[in-house]
Image (cartoon, grey):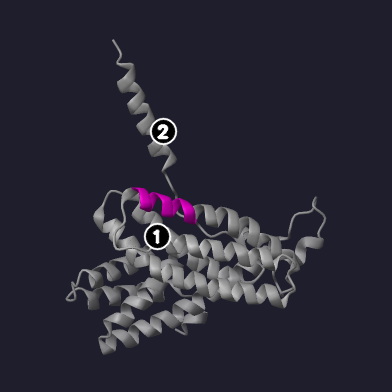
Amino acid sequence: PIDKAELRKILEKLIRQDQLQVKPIVWSREYSVGSALMDQQHQVLIGYINQMVDCYADIGSLSSQQRILKILPEFHQYVATHFKDEEMLLSEIGYPDLGAHLVVHERYGDRVASYYQSTMDEAQVRSLVQLLMNWWNQHVLVEDMAYKEYLNEPKSLEEATSTPPSVSLSGQAEEEVDDELMMIFFDSATKNRDKLIAALSNKDWREVRSVVHSVKGSAVSFGYPELSKIAETVQTAIDEENMEQVPVLVMDLIIEMGAVLPAAVDGS
């Protein structure tokens, strides 16, 4: 006979596992709020969130929990910068709901700060990642989108809002937005590659790690998983103090970045 109690436990476990599946965020032009700076910062934030989603996939691992504790302060610092820039932008355009937006920012900052501690268990990792995903889905994709119509920047998506709903945006308009965002990425990648070359020459491993962290996040956001993977390998080698491997890995990363960059940007 079937043990109903045991079957129920198995089913409940499967349901919980299904509910806990969190997929990395992949940047899409549909996420654009109409500001090149805000879009760029949102993509960096995606990079941070995706790193914590990776940890979430191995939620029971102590190393994953420790890794989140390392990422969290950097993420929170970048969020603070983003909020400041966004609030300044909304003030400049006279956004009528700025006050409410400020309150949301403050509450979110307080909630993230509550996770600052020396240790983190599975429940706390789960809670943090769910908070970040909810923040992306609710705040960025809903509340941030609300100010899109008040912006008046060149080549932004809101320029096409005068198009009747029955008429789709032209492919050219979408390509212009994509091209603008990709040029931001390529410009950032070029600068980061130059920084890596200089840091490698000077054996400045702290600078290497800082640059690699930035490369890893932006590469994921812009659809370059292999570049992100190599950057992750460099960062892991530095964190684990496998310094004999680092120079070779950094060179691999520099070469891969050169392969990604278009000739017009790369200057080659």
Tell me which corner region of the image, top left, top right, bottom left or bottom right, holds residue 97: bottom right
Q: Which residue is mark 1?
A: 115
Q: Is residue 251 above or below residue 116?
A: below
Q: CA–CA distance between discs 1 and 2?
A: 26 Å
Q: Is residue 55 left or right of residue 187?
A: left
Q: Please say whether residue 257 is visible from this viewpoint.
A: yes
* Residue under the point 57% across and 59% down: 28
Q: Is residue 2 magenta?
A: no
Residue type indicated by callout 2: Ile
Horizontal and vertical percent for residue 177?
Answer: 64, 68
Q: Residue at x 64, y 77 (%)?
A: 88
Circle 1: element type? loop
**Looking at this view, is 120 or 51 the one in front?**
120
Left or right, residue 233 beside residue 228 = left
Question: Which element type, helix, strand or loop, lies under badge 2?
Answer: helix
Q: Is residue 125 magenta?
A: yes
Front-most of residues 75 and 47: 75
Query: In the image, residue 163 lies at what x, y percent?
Result: 81, 59
Number of other residues with Cα within 10 Å of mark 1, as a class: few under 14, some 14 to 19, many 20 or more: some
Q: Earlier in the sequence, mark 1 or mark 2?
A: 2
* Residue that label 2 marks: 15
